[in-house]
Image (spheres, helix red, strand yellow):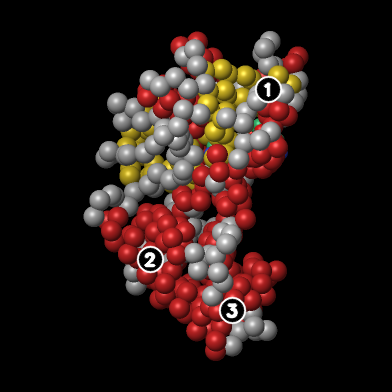
Amino acid sequence: MFVPARGGDPVTGSAGAADTGVRPSVAVSPDAMLIRRTLDEIEPVADKVTSYFYALLFVHHPDLRALFPAAMDVQRDRLFKALLTSVKNVDDTGYITDYLSHLGRGHRKYGTLPEHYPAVGECLLSALARYASGTWNPEAEAAWVRAYTTISQIMIDAAAEDEAVAPAWWQAEVVSHELRTPDIAVVTVRPDQPYPFLAGQYASVETPWWPRVWRHYSFAAAPRSDSLLSFHVKAVPAGWVSSAMVHRARPGDVIRLGPPSGSMTVDHTTDNGLLCLGGGTGIAPIKALVEDVAERGHRRPMEVFYGARSGHDLYDLDTMLRLEQSHPWLSVRPVVATGRPDGPANSLSGQLPDAVRQYGPWREYDAYLSGPPGMIRNGVDALVGVGIPSDRIRHDSVDELVAAGD
Ligand SMILES: NC(=O)C1=CN([C@@H]2O[C@H](COP(=O)(O)OP(=O)(O)OC[C@H]3O[C@@H](n4cnc5c(N)ncnc54)[C@H](O)[C@@H]3O)[C@@H](O)[C@H]2O)C=CC1
């Protein structure tokens, strides 16, 4: 069943592929042609198709309603994005297997079972038949049946394999909650079982206050010997989970975590310098990357540009400056959008990508970006513009950051 999350997207490491959703240079099969024609037809009415699909699903299979959140707005968008990514790339076997395996494993935390897949497939095909009437015919239907069968089998198999080695979710008790600004909190939790992850990754999080609503937060520290995990959370308007994490969560509360995801991790096979752009709470995984490099004990130049709207919003600057003092290979530059009078004495003024352009050269660096989607898009353009090849620029999927919306 498609209930994709940012966690389901293994394309996050590559700036180019992550943003288009379509992989280049793979021959297009007749099935893929038929599928794309259907998709082209329904794309302008995607909202209607997904609403109709869910209406069918819940009417015909009311028992499945309990697997989904009460409010379905974000969910609808996620379904369509995952569907598009899957079927558009149906001919790229390696890519699609990675993507769907990840998605299948990520679905375990929703309680998805193998028998749910045929129900979803049936309703999906009915929704397509209704809204793609111009291109829907027996050939198109047969192509969709084949594609959906392949997709669901990969997801089912990956979930079954994962069951042998990892829990479907982890429970984690809040052990500290520190309000850094009126709307940003550092939340530290203790998972109930070992939680293996890499610096730069993120987890999906469900709070007790909004059951079945999962949102993604990057780990704000590299794996620690005491097994604690930290997240930096900013409460945003209409962000139910983030508001609950900032304003309601207290020590003793128990949240649920999905498996770790994301490939914005340090490439330890090279000695390249690391250029990091962290905007707002996007500084959290950058801090984890700094700790990761420090733990390796391998001196590589690391240049962090830490951007915020105002000096007041640089809520983790002290931590970053302490790290800079302890590590001679690390440089941290605060960048304040509103300019100097508002920021610390040594801060740069303006938007992060512009600040980075003033320094360099960066050609020999690997780049890492974390923050709001607009910053990532403009940042990638700026970095490609100063000569960093896009395969050495890492960030989480912008599509999924937008879809998370919280
Ligand atoms: N792994 C990741 O990519 C993570 C992403 N985030 C995201 O980071 C965001 C943090 O929000 P806030 O703290 O409110 O950030 P913000 O809106 O205050 O912006 C932070 C920085 O990004 C710059 N920026 C914003 N929009 C820009 C644009 N269009 N072009 C160039 N620069 C731009 C700002 O100038 C500022 O320096 C959230 O959207 C959150 O989802 C947070 C943690 C991890």
Q: Quadrant of residue 385?
A: top right
Q: Label 3 belongs to which residue?
A: 34
* Image point (34%, 72%), residue name: 115
SS class, disc 1: loop
State which tag comes first along the sequence, 3 or 2: 3
SS class, disc 2: helix
- In the image, what residue type sits under mark 2? Ile
* Image point (46%, 11%), residue name: 326
Q: Position of residue 20 (x, y in %)?
A: 62, 55
* Image point (68%, 10%), residue name: 345
* Image point (37%, 69%), residue name: 153
In the depicted structure, whether residue 50 falls above or below residue 68: below
Q: Whole-Å distance between the Cαs marked 3 and 1?
A: 49 Å
Decide: few, some or many residues near mark 3? Use Cα within 10 Å; few <14, some 14-19, many ≥20: some
- In the image, what residue type sits under mark 3? Leu
Q: Label 2 belongs to which residue?
A: 154
Q: Depth-wise, is mark 3 or mark 1 nearer the camera?
A: 1
Residue in the foreground of this view, choosing between 182 and 376: 376
Q: Is ligand 1 within 8 Å of the beta carbon of the residue shown at mark 1?
A: no
Q: Is ligand 1 within 8 Å of the beta carbon of the residue shown at mark 3?
A: no
Residue 359's disc is: 1
Residue farthest along the left direction in this orientation? 164
SS class, disc 3: helix
- In the image, what residue type sits under mark 1? Tyr
Name the quarter where the C terminus is drawn. Answer: top right
Ligand 1 lies in which image quarter? top right
The reply to whether discs 1 and 2 touch (Cβ–Cβ < 8 Å) is no
